[in-house]
Amino acid sequence: MQFFVDTADLDAIAELNALGLVDGVTTNPSLIKKSGRDFKDTIAEICGIVSGPVSAEVIAVDADGMLEQGRKLAAIAPNVVVKLPLTLPGLQVCKTLSDEGTQTNVTLCFSANQALLAAKAGATYISPFIGRLDDIHIDGLDLIREIRTIYDNYMFETQILAASIRGPLHVKECALIGADVMTAPPNVISALADHVLTAKGLETFLADAKTAGITI
C-alpha cells in the first residue's frame, strides 16, 4: 500500500519524505488555507520535494471552469494529479483530462456507485472518505470493501485512495482490505511506529546495556 501524506505543511512533508514514508501528497483548499501560503506556489514546492503524485484540487464547480483550472494545475509540474469533485460535471472533466493523459483524483466519494462512475470516467484515483462516514454512524471501511470488490470484479485500473483516515486502525484495516493507497495527516503516519511494548522493551534494553557497561 502506498502512503500519501495529507497536508500542505512543507516541513512535515520533507521530514516524512526523508524517512522514506511518503509516496505522494494530497492537498485541498482547506489545507492550503491552513498553511497561509499561495496556492500554486505551495503545490509547486511540494512537487519539488516529492517525486510521487501530488493532488491539487480545482475550486470551480462547472465543467468549463474545472477543465480550465485542471489544465493550469497540471502545467505546474509533471507529478500533479488534478483533484475533482464527484459530481457529474466533475466526472465529465475527469474523462476529458484522463483522455489528455492527465492524472486525476476524484474526491468526496461516499458510495460504491459513485466509485463505479469514477472508474468508468477513467479516474486515476478514487478517494472514499472513511472518517466522515464514521462521523454519521456508517462504517467507512465497508465502503472500501465494496469498492475493492467492484473494481476487482471488472478489473478497473482506478486506484482506491482511502482518505479521511483518523488513526492507525484505519490504516491497518485499509491495508487488510487491499486499498491501493491511503492518505493521512503527518501525525497519523508517525503514530504507526508507536507501540507501548516497543517503548517498554527499548527502555529495558538500554538499562541493561548501561548496567553491563556495553559500548559500541
Image: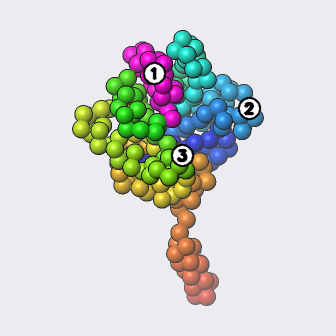
Lower sequence index among marks 3 and 2: 2
The residue identified by callout 2 is 37
Q: Residue at x 45, y 21 (%)?
A: 88
- Which residue is the site of mark 1? 88
- Secondary structure at numbered mark 1: helix
Queried whether the magenta region covers residue 100, the answer comes back as yes
In three-dimensional space, the C-alpha distance between marks 1 and 2, rounded to whole angstroms, equals 31 Å
The amino acid marked with disc number 3 is: Arg
Q: What is the C-alpha distance between the residues marked 3 and 2?
A: 26 Å
Secondary structure under the numbered disc 2 in the rendered image:
loop
Q: Amino acid at mark 2?
A: Arg
Q: Quadrant of residue 66?
A: top right
Q: Where does the C terminus fall, quadrant-wise? A: bottom right
Q: Position of residue 199 (x, y in %)?
A: 57, 73
**What's the coloring here?**
rainbow
Q: Residue 105: x and y, percent?
A: 47, 30
Range of the magenta residues? 84-108
Select label 3 or label 2 by which is in front: 3
